[in-house]
Amino acid sequence: MADDAPRYHFRDVVREDFPLLAKWLAEPHIAKWWGEVDEELAGIEEAMTSVETRPMIVELEGRPIAYLQYYDPHLEEGHPYQDQPKGTLGIDISIGIAELVGKGHGSAIIRQFVRELFASGAKRIVIDPDPENSAAIRAYEKAGFRYVDTRTSIYGPAHFMALDAPEETDLQ
């Protein structure tokens, strides 16, 4: 299989995913970076009908393995990333299954997903791990993201990173 061949399937979160999401959010490798399970599930439920955020499940060979969401900071009133150019989307990802962490799935999922976002017209993708989450930062660097600055979001300090769409060339 070619390295850039689509390997993962992305689908919208549905209510039936909530027991699995609750299990994942309670896992120590996720709970360390996310809030209380019921609050996070309420936020995901709200996002399911919002215009600014799209919550998704990542599947590998038909098996759900990760939660991913993307959002448009320009659609959310007062979002701290509105200083980014129009066409910027933010993403968040958590590998749900502890045994799959550290195996390269995070960066591979992100590489595939950002290709799809860029193909749909996104100009820049941003991600904002906690500065203490060195494993996530490494995965995002492997996916091509570069450090921009350290910010403070409503969730606390953020290691703000960005990836710009590939430049169009005349060789199309």
Image (cartoon, rainbow, N blue to C red):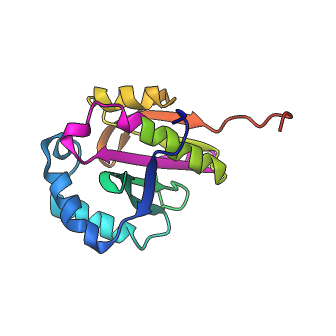
Question: Which residue is at a point 13% across and 42% down the rendered structure image?
Answer: 28
- Residues rendered magenta in the picture: 81-107
Q: Is residue 120 left or right of residue 26?
A: right
Question: Which residue is at a point 36% across and 66% down the rendered structure image?
Answer: 13
Looking at the image, how many numbered discs can be counted on the residues? Answer: 0
Question: Which residue is at a point 50% across and 69% down the rendered structure image?
Answer: 51
Q: Quadrant of the C terminus?
A: top right
* Residue 152 in view, yes or no: yes
- x and y percentages locating residue 42 in the rendered image: 25, 68
Q: From what the image shows, is residue 51 above or below residue 69?
A: below
Depth check, front residue: 55 or 153: 55
- x and y percentages locating residue 126 in the rendered image: 50, 41
- x and y percentages locating residue 58 in the rendered image: 38, 53
Q: Is residue 100 magenta?
A: yes
Q: Is residue 107 left or right of residue 134?
A: right
Q: From what the image shows, is residue 74 above or below residue 15?
A: above
Residue at the farthest front position: 1
* Residue 84 in view, yes or no: no
Q: From what the image shows, is residue 152 above or below residue 121?
A: above
- x and y percentages locating residue 139 in the rendered image: 38, 30
Q: Is residue 9 left or right of residue 19?
A: right
Question: Which residue is at a point 51% across and 36% down the rendered structure image?
Answer: 1
Depth check, front residue: 3 or 155: 3
Q: Is residue 21 magenta?
A: no
